[in-house]
Amino acid sequence: MRQKNRGLGLFTFFIYLFLLGPLVIIAFASFEPGSAMKFPPQGFSLKWYQNIFEVSMFKTSFITSILVSLAGNLLALLLGLPAAYALSRFQFRGKAALNAIFISPVLIPGIVLGFTMLKYVIITYNLPVYSALLIGHTVIMLPFIIRVIASSLANFDFAVEEASLSLGAGRLKTFFTVVLPNIKSGIIAAVLIAFLESFNNVDISVFMTGPGISTFPIQMLLYVENNFDPTIAAISVLLMLFTAVLMFIIERLMGLSYFTKR
Amino acid sequence: MAMLTLENIAVSYDQQYILKDFNLSVEKGSLISLLGPSGCGKTTTLRLIAGFLDAKEGKFALNGKDYTRVPVNKRNFGFVFQSYALFPHLSVYDNVAFGLRLRKVNKADVDRRVRRMLDIVNLSGFEQRFPKELSGGQRQRVAIARALVIEPDLLLFDEPLSNLDANLRVNMRVEIRRIQQELGITTVYVSHDQEECFSISDQVAVMNKGIIEQLDKPSTIFKYPKTEFVARFIGFNNFITFDSRQENGNVIELQTKGRTFRALHGEGRGEQKGLKGAIRPDDLKLGTQEELGVDFNLLPGKVKVSTYLGRSYQYVIETELGEFTVNKEMEQPYISGQEVLVHFPIEKLIVVE
Ligand SMILES: Nc1ncnc2c1ncn2[C@@H]1O[C@H](COP(=O)(O)OP(=O)(O)OP(=O)(O)O)[C@@H](O)[C@H]1O
Ligand SMILES: [Mg+2]
């Protein structure tokens, strides 16, 4: 018994090492004063952190990424919220098919999706880079929005909506005064998860970006193609922190929604 | 005068009819229960009345007004759900005030009416609590207050007590009945608990497969079921199938296999159509002819099984007309194989369809 537990402990240790090791190495390496990444670092310096803000294409691509992710998020929410509601509340023909279509972007490899969109949508309709990026990112966010909101709707008793109807509220009024406040945390979680998905996306963006316009992860890729300094490690550390904060919020929201369940 | 009427209502879920040619009428201010086994269409009937479901055919009217096509949010009915269905994000006060605010009642009146209603359901002081901070019984009372405060034209309950424990159930049903009578609101109440229905209703409709088998006062149903289904449902476990019948004044004579049994016509017993005799295990008598002191409605039999029930013994008696279950209190129990006479007291033998 004891033996087995020790084996399991060792196993867990290696999993964590495997998962977190690279992150720790990157974090340390980001403080390297020299112009090449080293582990362990030969000193301590924040100059590569400073460098992030001096490279102008990081700044512009960061803004592009944020804008595309936010605007795409809004679009995906406007499409996804009614879709999630319809899929979880009504029975209709073709529901299963629609479900599959909304989920498919998660299942299809990003490269395939990106290439297909480029060839059959972007080029066919000759869309400008920004619109292309927006469409692409809306498409990849939609499944996350729909799935997270649908799961939070599934935890919400339909009878509560009926109670509202029977008390005299119309369908729309019921949606806004009764449904929405109760799936609020689910919606926020959906938006954050989708945001992370979009912000980190490379495989779709790579087909949509054009000369002079690029997203942040793409810019990072371009940067490491030509530079070997620890700037990229510094960026990674900042992104990790950013992601950790978002994940923490998501965890709190989804966790809370478990407690409010009867 | 009938206040609520359902006329030839039909409801179907994808091709399959759940209700067909369904008729019901309820008097103003009375409480009627729909009672029946699971899946017989009670909830369907109630949801149709509430407006959550559309009728395929037929007409539903209330106080002479046709409601068949009126959408649910325009009906002004109070609905109390099995799951309470309180608004989780609103306090007790706001839950109860919800319907009033939709009706644009002014603030002072909302406050007065909400507080009065919370007082009626004994929840004063709980205004600021949220539903998850309440017990099941308290939640159900909030649900009742929320449905009542809008002064509904009709009050609908769908198994409101089935999530509560036995003691609370009894208290709550007394409470529901008290409030309903105090406010004089016409009410339709769904349950599959017999005792609950009988104890709070003016009238009970026993349903079976989308049909009302009998609509009567609780005591009438309890004593004089009209059909075999109703009889079985309320505990008449013994049946005799007869071949023919004659009426002889207020006596009905029924024959099978050369034997004649007598049952009574008259006061409160309804038409007593049909060719089946029904009787409860408690009402059958056992003994010798001297012990029983009668010379008709007797049937010789043999004790097949004897079970000790604590207060009494339960016997299964085998006869040429089938097996009968009899409950009997006695010191010296019968043993298996013993020959006895089964007596069907004339006033207890009910003729059903
Ligand atoms: N949404 C639905 N789709 C298809 N069939 C349904 C639906 N709702 C109910 N039914 C069927 O309609 C019949 C009547 O259901 P209903 O809910 O009215 O029964 P009930 O008398 O309330 O039973 P219970 O005591 O179990 O609540 C059942 O056979 C049920 O399977
Ligand atoms: Mg039901």
Image (cartoon, rainbow, N blue to C red):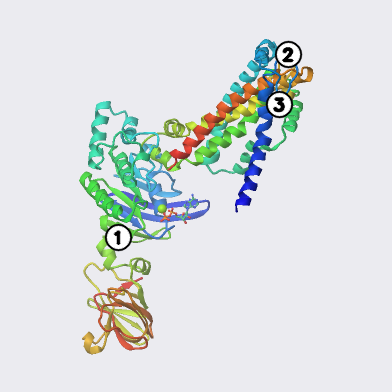
Q: Is residue B150 visible?
A: yes
Residue placed at 73% from the left, 15% from the top? Answer: A34
Which of the chains bears the disc numbered 2?
A: A
Image spot of residue B351 (x, y percent): 31, 73
What is the three-letter code of the residue carrying label 2? Gly
Q: CA distance from mark 3 to mark 1?
A: 67 Å
Residue, disc 2: A212
Q: Is residue A78 left or right of residue A18?
A: left
> Are labels 2 and 1 on one chain?
no
Residue, disc 3: A202
Earlier in the chain: of badge 3 and badge 2, it is 3
> Are labels 3 and 1 on one chain?
no
Which of the chains bears the disc numbered 1?
A: B
Position of B297 relative to A146 (above/below): below
What is the three-letter code of the residue carrying label 1? Glu
What is the three-letter code of the residue carrying label 3? Val
Residue, disc 1: B195
Q: How many marks?
A: 3
